[in-house]
Amino acid sequence: MYIMYLATTKLVWLEKSADAGYAQAQWLLANRYKEGEKFFLPWQRQEAVGRWLKASAESGFPKGMLEYSAYLYENGGDLSVARHWIEEAAKSGYESGVSSYGAYLAHAPSLYDFPLDLIKGYALTSLLTELDGGGNIKPYVDEVLPEIAAKMSAEQIEEAKKFAQQWKATHPPLSFFPDKLGL
């Protein structure tokens, strides 16, 4: 059904795919609704976007996890739930999840009311160097990692390096999760 949507751009196929539980379709449907597809009363559009982003996050799609957390943040939702989905996106190996989680833990910037954890924030951000600049991540790391390090002692940096190795050994490899079927 998702492939039929990609082939025809008929929203009915995307809706069927989302209803059938395909996480990427749920995420894309939320975005299509956000872009103005289909008629909704104004308050119903936001509800539909939130419902499909939540479904995508719960179905394990990392992009859906991050967008659902942003949806909660922007719409006055429960920040503990938003923080949960950012952490889950990071645990999946999704590059944007790791970069967001690391930055928010280190308060670089301070969003979502994450408790300050410079060691974990530095560790996660440092793992992004392994992507070798792919996806334009190198300029980000070159800016944020020294900002975090400036707040840390040498002992904390060493502890962060150990934590990074532990994370790497117990989580999936980092990925940009490139799309395989079009969007």
Image: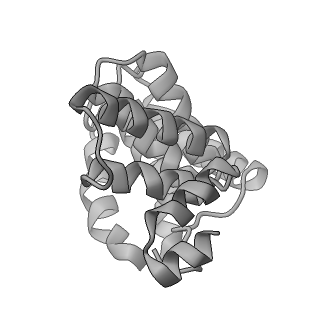
The foreground one among 5 and 146 is: 5
* 102 sits to left or right of 16: left
* 157 sits to left or right of 168: left
Residue 178 percent coordinates (x, y): 53, 74
Question: Residue at image x 24%, y 57%?
Answer: 143
Q: How is the image coloured?
A: one colour
Question: Residue at image x 45%, y 44%?
Answer: 66
The foreground one among 67 and 14 is: 14
Residue 40 seen in the figure: yes
The foreground one among 3 and 57 is: 3
Which quarter shows the C terminus? Answer: bottom left
Which quarter shows the N terminus? Answer: bottom right
Q: Is residue 93 above or below residue 118?
A: below
Residue 128 percent coordinates (x, y): 48, 62
Question: Residue at image x 64%, y 45%?
Answer: 91
Q: Which residue is farthest bottom?
A: 7
Q: Is residue 5 above or below residue 115?
A: below
Residue 158 seen in the figure: no
Tell me which corner region of the image, top left, top right, bottom left or bottom right, holds residue 45: top left
Residue 118 percent coordinates (x, y): 42, 32
* 35 sits to left or right of 115: left
Question: Residue at image x 27%, y 26%?
Answer: 43
Residue 47 percent coordinates (x, y): 38, 29
Q: Is residue 113 above or below residue 110?
A: above
The foreground one among 53 and 146 is: 53
